[in-house]
Amino acid sequence: MEHFKLGERALSHGVRLEIYDEIDSTNDEAKRRAEAGDAGPLWIVAARQTKGRGRLGRRWSSLDGNLHASLLISDFGPAALAPQLGFVAGLATIGALIEATGATERLALKWPNDVLLDGEKLAGVLLEGAQPPWPGAPFGCVIGIGVNCVAAPHDLATRASDLSRLGGPRRDAGAIFASLSNKMEETLALWAGGSGFPALRERWLSHAAGLGGEIEAQLARETISGVFETIDADGRLIVSTRNGRRAIEAGDIFLPALAAARPDPERRQ
Ligand code: BTN
């Protein structure tokens, strides 16, 4: 198994780490800890997940050598701002990946919080609420992050990539995790319970894939097309369509320009 340890910054902030050879889902374990009264900050990392979960009820293939990690936190700020933590996580993840690989130009963020390598999915974030066991206790949040370090799953509706495509030295899950644990502390400090979201949003946009280009957004009941203008002050995706501006809170986006640059147009990112 990889050797997992926290980075210096995380250690100095009193963050704890628990490591498993195998678990159902690191998000599920973090939620169980919250239900048992743990307020975090606590990282749960597992070499294998038997029931890894992705966004929108999807499965997340947890291949050996990839990173599966979840952070439980509770004292982050107003519960209503918890959805912004997805952007914190996306930015921390791309920060860790840039630090580990130096491949700044090949890495990008895809709304809401995927990390892409050459336009293909490299990492994903699953943000979930966690229930404390007693009334009045601060709301908990679990930030689950999966990074394809050594292998890309082929059973996704998305095209996926992994860090081995970069060539060069092997970037193992342990090294990525140590950096991620630090970047998460840095990015949480920048976010500052929500007051730093404007600055965080600017940073997020500086890494955004497809900004200013054509985009297709699959929502629960419709698909809309238009130009990806920006994300707004609440993190919603702003698309200008023929019928006006739309602000999108949840859904999947498809970036035709990235697909056109790839050989296999059948599969969607
Ligand atoms: C997505 O892009 O759909 C989100 C994927 C999140 C996967 C990670 S792996 C660690 C944590 N545990 C889970 O069951 N899911 C997240």
Image (tube, helix red, strand yellow):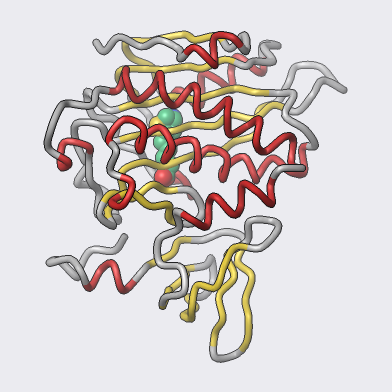
Residue 145 placement (x, y as % from top left): 44, 33
Assign the N terminus to one quadrant of the image. top left
User: Which is more toward the observer, 194 or 132?
Assistant: 194
Whereabouts is ligand 1, in terms of quadrant?
top left
Residue 53 visible in the current orientation: no
Q: Please tell me whether residue 161 is drawn above or below residue 137 in the rendered image.
A: below
Q: Residue 164 vs residue 44: left or right? A: left
**Residue shown at 34% from the left, 25% from the top:** 176
Residue 210: image quadrant is bottom left
**Residue shown at 82% from the left, 20% from the top:** 137
Assign the C terminus to one quadrant of the image. bottom left
Q: Residue 26 vs residue 192: left or right? A: left
Q: Please tell me whether residue 196 is drawn above or below residue 31 in the rendered image.
A: below
Q: Please tell me whether residue 186 is drawn above or below residue 155 in the rendered image.
A: above
Residue 196 visible in the current orientation: yes
Residue 91 placement (x, y as % from top left): 50, 42
Tell which residue pokes out farthest to the bottom in this image.
242
Residue 177 placement (x, y as % from top left): 39, 22
Number of dots carrying numbers: 0
**Residue shown at 19% from the left, 46% from the top:** 154
Q: Please tell me whether residue 11 is drawn above or below residue 155 in the rendered image.
A: above
Residue 188: image quadrant is top right
User: Which is more toward the observer, 259 or 24?
Assistant: 259
**Residue shown at 35% from the left, 35% from the top:** 97
Residue 224 placement (x, y as % from top left): 49, 78
Q: Residue 202 vs residue 162: left or right? A: right
